[in-house]
Amino acid sequence: MSQQFSGAAAIRAAVMIMGSTYVTYAVGLLVSIVIARHLGPDDFGRYAYVVWMAGILLAIANNGLTSTSIRFVSESLGRKSPDAARRVHGWLLRRQVACMVLVALGFIVAARWLAPDGWEGPLAWFVLVALAAGLSKAVYIFDASIAKGYGRFDVEARATVAMSFLNLVLVLVLVALRAPLIAYLCAFVLVSAGHMAISRTMLRKGGMRARMDPPDPALEAQVRRHLLWTVVLVLAYTFSHMSIETYLLNATVGTAEVGFFAIAAALSRGGVDLLASGLVTVMMPVMAHGFGEGGTARVNEIMANCLRYCLFMGLLLIGVGVLVARPGVLLMYGEQYEAVVFALRVMVVVGGLTLGEAAFNSLLSTTDNQRMRVVFAVLSLVITAGFAFALVPRWGLAGAIASHAASRLLVFALVAALISRRLALRIPWREFLRLGGCALLAGALACALVLAMPGMWTELVAGVVFALLFLAATVVFDAWRASDVAHLLEFLERYPAVHGRVSGPLRRWATGLQ
């Protein structure tokens, strides 16, 4: 089992998750475009709002259970105790079921105050769709988290790819039938249930079964303490990341603006996932396994590498995203969605600059600093709520964008500074400065191209030019370490044809690195 958490295995898992994410994102983007063009801004806004509400129910139902399962299942396996991992699985599963029941009852009571603006038809349809989709997906996310704790990242990859294609087929059929909004929402429910069916089947076949006996008292106390803090953390995080802005847009402005905000959020989030999904997915299990093997020193070493990779991918996302935002939105969604362009550019910059947030969260969770995570999450919620209530009712979509950007950047800066000091984290400033310099150089050349030949297609070409120049510059100016090359060579040993061609040049390059 420990081989599933080695350096090569981590890279392999990251590549698998990234590959599935590419497919899922491409198909999901196509689905979003088709639905948005067919329904128009107002009905698409209602669709996006219901999908968002299902996500909120999912997050509340799962609360801290998923993070806790990844950490303690993986950590138990790192300590060579598979029986403890199964007991943790069972202990958390019982609480998962109880949370789902409570969420369902609470949502039924509050549904009349949470319905989309301009909702037509019985309120029961809104309740049924949001609950069925949200709770089905909650089961899937819980199962996928347990699987990640076992080092099985294929559960998430297979489920997302398969259901993405099913979703595309269903949507194309509905477009051909000129179906109404409720039909698209029913398709969303079916796809969510499909995720759950696949994850349940794969866990059973993979032998990842829960034991209902409680863990030993010492371990149970650890799990309970971690879960308690994580519940507060997840709830604060859920309501501080675009949720308040989305609710206020629906309540005070209208559903079209909800749709614009949702498209920008999905595109920016998709850009992050395309670049960083593999790393983010394996980050916490690898840190937890490292903590079980070597304690805090080993985790800090892994953390420093994660921060370097996050900055590299964040800068790549910013450069490409800002350049291709306008042509991308107009070509995909049409001119009626032009309001998305500015929102997308701001969110891409914010997402790229705060990409390391996932690494900090994994570090705090792994090193038993959940209390600090909770403090940061509550702080984020307070700051977000302050900005949102001050800006969204008055400025609408622009206020929601400003609220999102200001709160995320301010909170991330505070988190990075305080964690670095509290945990004596060594920040790799040398690589940070070199990566930043490479991004500035590539960005200046790409912008010069746009200024010399203005136009939509030039902006698309400039995005590609930025990516190529940035990658080349990081190599020329030694923004990497010899250990990075060693991990890459270890991974490429699985592909002898490729390894034979590139191993020589890579080793020669690595000799000049630190």
Image (cartoon, rainbow, N blue to C red):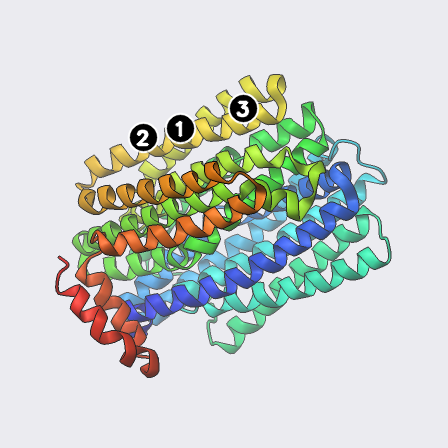
The residue tagged 1 is 379
Q: Quadrant of residue 482?
A: bottom left
Q: Circle 1 sits in a helix, a strand or a loop, which is it?
A: helix
Q: Nearer the viewer, mark 1 or mark 3?
A: 3
Check the image and report above or below for 390 versus 427.
above
Residue 388: mark in rendering? 3
Residue 20 falls left or right of residue 334: left
Residue 414: mark in rendering? 2
Residue 78: mark in rendering? none
Q: Which amino acid does label 3 sit on?
A: Ala
Q: Circle 2 sits in a helix, a strand or a loop, which is it?
A: helix
Check the image and report above or below for 501 versus 160.
below
Q: What residue type is labelled 2?
A: Leu
**Residue at position x 79%, y 32% in the image:** 118
Quadrant location of the C terminus in the rendered image = bottom left
Quadrant location of the N terminus in the rendered image = bottom left
Query: Given the current orientation, which residue lies at the most extreme bottom position?
Result: 496
Q: Circle 3 sits in a helix, a strand or a loop, which is it?
A: helix
Observer-nearest of 55 and 107: 55
Q: How crowded is mark 3: few (under 14 residues within 10 Å), some or many (20 or more)?
A: many
Q: Position of residue 408 (x, y in %)?
A: 43, 32
Observer-nearest of 391 and 499: 499
Q: Where is residue 281 in the image (x, y as percent from the top left)?
A: 41, 58
Q: Which of marks 3 and 2 is nearer the N terminus?
A: 3
Q: Where is residue 174 in the image (x, y as percent from the top left)?
A: 81, 57
